[in-house]
Image (cartoon, rainbow, N blue to C red):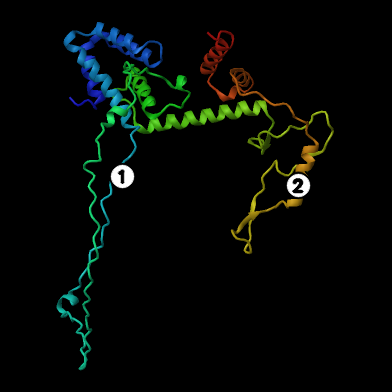
Amino acid sequence: MSVLDVNLARKNLVDVLGESSKSYFAHLKSWFCMKTTKEEFDRQARLFLKTDQVHLHNDFLLAIVTKCQSLCQPSTYVYHGVKHKPTVVSEVDKIRPTVVPQRKVNACEIKPITVTRQVQPKNKPLGVNFDNRFQPVNPVSLLPPSIPRAIEKPQVRYCSQDLTLPDAGLVHGRMLVAAWDVGLDHGCEDKAIKLILAATKQFLRELIVAIVTNRKGYRIREKKVIYSIGQPTLNPWLHNSWSVHDSTSNSYGTEISQLAEPPHVPAIPQTIQNAERDSAFYLACTTEQNTSLQPISVLDVFQTLQVKKSVIPWHTVHAVNMERISQRLYHPN
């Protein structure tokens, strides 16, 4: 059996486990969710198997690891050399005789005269012999003394501990277990893993934007596009007419002009003088913000999710994460 075949390794293991397969995959899922360690999972797995059947458990884990690592390997490029275009000879060139250009020789051809000059050898220096001066030294004797260290077993770390985004291998392992739980024996496709990775990055981007906009001022274009994050906000207690003079809150269509390059130009272009005037007028209507903010903390995430519940639209996921954040705030240990 090939170690790379995950489905075949899982089928052989399920046939041996029988009714204990549900308990086995429950322990596997707990290990993936960091509820148990690898040693505890191996100990529970050996209770379901006989001594001559433990290799099926090892083959199954090795197949999962190999399948997940195959997605993280970079693509290699092999250079095959420069491919020359073959010369095509027509039928007319095959019949036509090949003409070799002949070199014309004049009647009075002047041949070059070669003059050979003998160079007298100079006095050669005497060779220096270093046989009696060189003393070989063992380079190993000059190395600093080495202290043997005990080989430490690498500890399995997760994304929440390393503070990094999940890679394709980690997502593939989680997706395999989730697919087997719902009865999908063939696992998951590579396109689904790429979709999960893209969705994770998009969710983190929306969460970070929501946290930053909850702490600092920003401007909105067309009532939905956020831009100019970090600018001071308008003073609500100051009577002003900024909403009337604001020309950047809406977008206008473009018109086609034959004199412009490219032909699509804004229908209402704003001059530099108008842009400077609007910026000065906006700053005059805002409040002064001289306070320096602290780095983003767990409390900022908690307050943001309380105010902007649309970041996590699913109520179950939102409630569970709010409970975890509050528990970490009030019970750090």
- Say if 220 sits above or below 104 in the image: above
| Position of residue 23 measured from the top left corner of the image (x, y, whole percent) | 31, 9
Locate residue 329 relative to residue 199 in the image: left or right.
Answer: right
The disc label shown at residue 117, or none:
none
The answer to whether one can see residue 241 in this image is: yes
Q: Residues within 10 Å of mark 1 (few under 14, many from 20)?
A: few
Q: Which residue appears at 23% of the width and 21% of the height?
A: 9
Q: Which quadrant of the figure has residue 184? A: top left
Could you tell me which residue is drawn at 26 percent across and 54 percent down? 81
Up-down: is 226 above or below 174? Answer: below
Secondary structure type for disc 2:
helix
User: Which amino acid type is marked by label 1?
Assistant: Tyr
Asked which secondary structure carries label 1, the reply is loop
Residue type for callout 2 = Glu
Q: Residue furthest right?
A: 239
**How far across and down, in percent of the image, does residue 38 sit?**
33, 13
Q: Quadrant of residue 230?
A: top right
Q: Which residue matches tag 2?
A: 276
**Residue carrying label 1:** 77
Is residue 243 visible to the viewer in this orientation of the structure?
Answer: no
- Mark 2 and mark 1 lie on one chain; the one further toward the N terminus is 1
- Left or right of 195? Residue 286 is right
- Residue at image position (58%, 18%) is 298
Q: Residues within 10 Å of mark 2 (few under 14, many from 20)?
A: few
